[in-house]
Amino acid sequence: MLLTTELFIAFKWFGIATIGFFLLTTLGFILNWEFRFRLVGITGFMGVLTVGLFGLSLGLFNRVEIPGAVPYTLVYDNGATQTVIAVSPTITEPELAATMEQAAGDLFSLGRLGGEDKLTIRVRTIIHPEEGVSQPLYLGKVKRSLYQREDENIDIKIFPETLAKLVDYQSHNLES
């Protein structure tokens, strides 16, 4: 995703190009060129693109970066109140807590539907205790408001018994 500074630089260049096409269109009308009306269309389209880039450069995408969060994959989202994310089986407890907080911020959307007023994000990983066997572990869940972007009452629950299984798996299988 482009940063707002990159979008602002693109806006400036498109603005210069739009002014250039406007001057070329004006010259086309003065010199009575045959394709002057095509230049009107090109200038108008460049103006639309320039205004769009300006709007995007205002910073309409605000994503909070939580220190210590690791990448996750969204594996289920019903568009309302239930989501599931997957994390690596090498995750540690501090990384898990930070990742859960990061996902709570990333998955917030005012367009979510639902009868409840809370978004529930479940966090899982898959371990392979033996060859050919996959076991999902649900490491925790996050509940946050569906209606407030800056939710002060995010409820993060890490399941200690499942996390203990993961730590045991990490100590036996990932070090060898």
Image: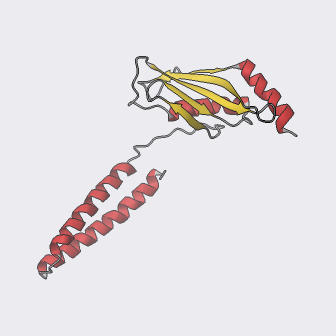
Report the side of 40 relative to 170 (left or right): left
Name the residue rendered at 53%, 30% in the picture: 104
Direction bottom: furthest residue: 31
Colouring mode (rainbow / by chain / secondary structure / one colour): secondary structure
Image position of 50 with respect to 78: above or below: below
Name the residue rendered at 66%, 24% in the picture: 138
Q: Which of the image's four quarters has the C terminus?
A: top right
Report the side of 15 relative to 88 (left or right): left
Q: Which one is in front, 27 or 131?
A: 131
Direction right: furthest residue: 176
Image position of 67 with respect to 3: above or below: above
Q: Quadrant of residue 72?
A: top right
Residue 85 locus on image (x, y percent): 59, 32
Q: Which one is in front, 61 or 169?
A: 169
Residue 49 locus on image (x, y percent): 31, 58
Q: Quadrant of residue 95?
A: top right
Residue 63 locus on image (x, y percent): 50, 40
Image position of 14 with respect to 75: above or below: below
Name the residue rendered at 56%, 39% in the picture: 65
Q: Quadrant of residue 159?
A: top right
Name the residue rendered at 70%, 32% in the picture: 126
